Amino acid sequence: MRVMIIVKASTSSEAGEMPNEQLLTDMGNFNETLVKAGIMRAGDGLKPSSEGVRVHFSGSDRTVMNGPFAETKELIAGYWLWDVNSMEEAIQWVKRCPNPMMEDSDIEIRPVFEAEDFGEEYTPELREKGDQMRTDVAVQQAMVQPYLFFGGRCEEALEFYRSAVGAHVLMKMRFSESPDRVPEGMLQKGFEEKIMHASITIGRQTIMASDGCNDQSKFDGFRLALSVATEAAADRVFDALADGGKIDMPLGKTFWSPRYGMVTDRFGIGWMVMVPGEASC
């Protein structure tokens, strides 16, 4: 079942008082525990009602009212959306939560309506429309990530990108470590200890990588666009990527960027390194 965990506002939250470092640390650790337990779907803190507005509905009329709003105890300062097995499980998790305020505070647990709660009023047509809407939202929130196959040189590539562009390896699994047995004849001989799957971050982007099942790899028809904040940073990563590779277009000024160039690294991956230009109307 899905539940919304509502953190009620307090005098300090409505006054805009920020939590101290200890509370931020404690809440961060609690959120990490929720994520690892697989129950957290969303969650955020809300700014004071003085920065919000209300829209009042009366027939066809709409009236906008600026905050702050009275009755602090009825306001919301933050929320989570959890997926739990029962209300009792939700209660036990809330009991583990650090006090979210400097003073006494309250957290409310409210079940989220599910389709079956609406009974016969929720017709097959409405159900289909709701399912389609949820599918549309899921597609809108989809992520596209590059998946690179290095033909037996993945380990070398990960180390190169760590040094060249500050890549951080999130995980790495070899074919010999796979929980499922690799099908007979799928791997080229000698690939048993090659990397089946790896995940790395470069800046804020996650990239997946593998050795693939054989030594055949071809990077063609695409480039990775790497944007950095300064020209000095562009020079550094461009030179690092060009080490052992080839420069396709030297770094220089273009009409869309003060610093832009193209390089193909030693593994055959093409890069476009750039400093973003100023936005124009």
Image: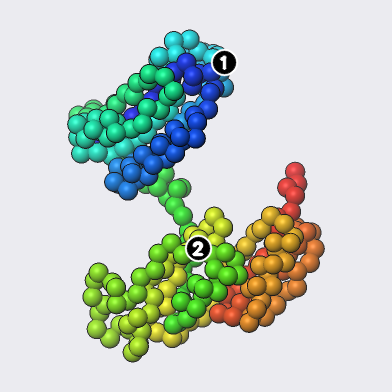
Instruction: Report the residue marked by disc 2.
Output: 168
Whether label 2 touches label 1, CB < 8 Å: no
Give the amino acid type for the residue marked by disc 2 in the picture. Answer: His
Instruction: Report the residue marked by disc 1.
Output: 66
Residue placed most toward the observer, 98 or 223 = 98
Identify the residue at horizontal 29%, vertical 73% (top origin).
177
Identify the residue at horizontal 31%, vertical 37% (top origin).
82
Q: Quadrant of residue 59?
A: top left
Residue 220, placed above or below residue 50? below
Give the amino acid type for the residue marked by disc 1 in the picture. Answer: Asn
Task: State the separation of the CA atoms marked 2 and 1.
Answer: 45 Å
Q: Position of residue 261 (x, y in %)?
A: 72, 69
Mark linked to residue 170:
none
Residue placed most toward the observer, 154 or 20 = 20
Q: Residues within 10 Å of mark 2 (few under 14, many from 20)?
A: some
Q: Quadrant of residue 244?
A: bottom right
Identify the residue at horizontal 54%, vertical 77% (top origin).
219
Mark yes or no: residue 18 visible.
Answer: yes
Q: Position of residue 221 (x, y in %)?
A: 57, 74
Secondary structure state at the residue bearing disc 2:
strand
Residue 209, placed above or below residue 246? above
Residue placed most toward the observer, 178 or 59 = 178
Name the quadrant of the N terminus.
top left
Identify the residue at horizontal 46%, vertical 31% (top origin).
45
